Image (cartoon, rainbow, N blue to C red):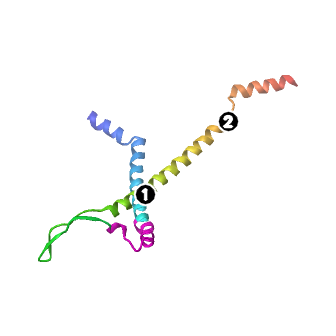
Amino acid sequence: MGFLKEFKEFAVRGNVVDMAVGVVMGGAFGAIVTSLVNDIIMPPLGKLISNVNFSELKCVLSEAVVENGEVVKPEAAIMWGQFIQTIVSFLIIALAIFTVIKGINSLKKKKEAAPAAPSEEIVLLREIRDALKK
């Protein structure tokens, strides 16, 4: 019974739940970036490069074998166009994460740069000093 209790404490600990939320959000963000690259960025880029669809660019190593309308042996190809799309997706995700982290770090620096409020003892000593001056 101790093992289950320990596991329950681990699983409901705040940082584990936060990590799970981050993984789910990261997956959703990845899907958005994939759609952005495949549906928004790459088509105009392909249009600029004489109507090229990057996802179809490949180097065929061996053609597919088709008999009686059925694929007996599938095509073997290096899908370098898809690889380019994946690199563009990675660069967009890396840029987005960089900007988020940079924003968080700048907020932290602002908090650190703000002068800390004086302690109660300092405030009390200043009041005593000001009273003695009078």
Q: Residue 115 got which mark?
A: 2
Q: Nearer the viewer, residue 96 or 43?
A: 43
Decide whether residue 110 is among the magenta residues. Answer: no
Judge whether 66 appears above or below 22 on screen.
Answer: below
Q: Which of 121 and 105 is in front in this view?
A: 105
**Most prominent secondary structure in the magenta stretch?**
helix
> The C terminus appears in which quarter of the rendering?
top right
Question: In the image, what residue type sits under mark 1?
Answer: Phe
> The N terminus appears in which quarter of the rendering?
top left
When asked about the image quadrant of residue 67, the answer is: bottom left
Residue 66 is situated, as x and y percent measured from the top left of the image, at 14, 73
Q: Earlier in the sequence, mark 2 or mark 1?
A: 1
Judge whether 33 appears above or below 131 on screen.
Answer: below
Residue 24 is situated, as x and y percent measured from the top left of the image, at 39, 53
Bounds of the magenta segment: 38-56
Residue 50 is situated, as x and y percent measured from the top left of the image, at 41, 74
Judged left or right of residue 72, residue 102 is: right
Q: Mark 1 points at which residue?
A: 29
Residue 81 is situated, as x and y percent measured from the top left of the image, at 34, 64
Q: Residue 88 got which mark?
A: none
Judged left or right of residue 64, residue 30 is: right
Element under label 1? helix
